[in-house]
Amino acid sequence: MIEPSAAQPHAPGASDANWVASVPNFAEGRDRLVVHAILAAMQLPGVLLLDYLLDAGRNRSVITIAGPSTAVWEAVVRAAGVATDRIDLTRQVGSHPRIGATDVIPFVPVGAVALLPCVLLAREAAAALWQRYHVPAYLYEAAASRPDRVLLEDVRRGQFEGLREAVLRDPGRRPDVGGPGLHPSAGATAVGARRALIEYNIALDTADLAPARAIAKAVRGQSSGLGVRALALLSEGRAQVTLGIPDHRQSSVGVVHAAVEEAARKHRTSILFGEIIGLLPEAAYEESSAWVAGLRGFRAEEHILERRLKNPLAWPATLLERDAPLPPETRHP
């Protein structure tokens, strides 16, 4: 178990005009030494480690950090350099869609910070990825320069294998920064700015992707009124509905969970458990709800954003020095 950090706890407030978070996703969830190296690159003064997840089934890792904007910016750019050197997408296999070794870098305002500074950070990070590593970038969400690139799923259409061919024949698919071709082994990175997004995975009691696809289609459709994003994937031998909830005030996690549960019944399956990827905003937490009771590996004091900011994780540099592997569990701590 990773111990809490000895760094000064911090709860951002109105005075933190430059406080941001970032949740970079990397196309590696099996090689712990690679993830170690990525984490080590992010360990800069002022940067707090809030959460990290290794998902071997989807071969993906998700890291959550926060701190002063300049430090967080440098941390994710340096981490992308390690991923460029250590992850080869021509050999990488996993069930989660991806276009890059560093697949996604979102900048997220925390506390009283506005979204515009995160847009500027995203655009500057995209330029740095090209200048430092020759990895092109697509700008998405609030940082998007085109309306057809606001949604991440539109940017990732075709994944690495399809996108590297598409950019050669279709100028409309080429990156916003760099290119026109992708990096031969590291692909491209989607860099964006957004409000806090709740990533909620629901495992189904089936190995058949067909009902998961039908459920995902039902809950993400305009007729559902939920305003969520949904994909069907296989993970750990089970079908899974992967959900992105951009505004929990419009559709709470409980409402989304109930919609998935109802759709699952229609397709003759059921929910086994849920999992929050990254951290959950305090305002979205419903302590006595059925969906919280069904979460795997969730502890409120460790996986709610505002609480984790007061008690961040220790950076695993000492583990690196002892050459010890990361614990086998996918969720940390």
Image: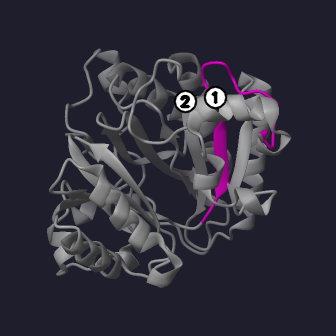
The residue labelled by disc 2 is: 101
Indicate the quadrant where residue 31 lies.
Answer: top left
In the structure shown, which secondary structural element does the residue marked by tag 1 occupy?
loop
When asked about the image quadrant of residue 308, the answer is: bottom left
Residue beneath disc 1: 187
254 or 94, which lies in front?
94
- Provide residue 69's location: percent of width, then percent of height: 65, 52
Q: Secondary structure at mark 2?
A: loop
Q: Residues within 10 Å of mark 1 (few under 14, many from 20)?
A: many
* 250 with respect to 127 (left or right): left
Q: Measured from the top left, where is residue 62 in percent x and y?
A: 42, 43
Q: Is residue 176 magenta?
A: yes
Name the quarter where the C terminus is drawn: top left
> Residue 232 vs residue 117: left or right?
left
Instruction: Judge whether residue 225 can be spotted in this image.
Output: no
- As drawn, 217 above or below 223: above
Please say if 162 is above or below 219. Answer: above
- The earlier-in-sequence mark between 1 and 2 is 2
192 left or right, relative to 181: left
For the point 85% across and 40% down, the residue is 171
Asked if the residues shown at circle 1 and circle 2 are in contact, with their CB atoms under 8 angstroms apart, the answer is: yes
Which of these two is toward me, 91 or 78?
91
For image coordinates 55% across by 71% down, the residue present is 111
Viewer-proximal residue, 11 or 34? 34
User: Looking at the image, can residue 263 be seen?
Assistant: yes
**Residue flagged by tag 2: what amino acid is it?**
Ala
**Please, what is the three-letter code of the amino acid marked with disc 1?**
Gly
Query: The magenta stretch spans which residues?
Result: 174-194
What residue is shown at x 63% (from left), y 28% (from top)?
A: 187
Q: How is the image coloured?
A: one colour
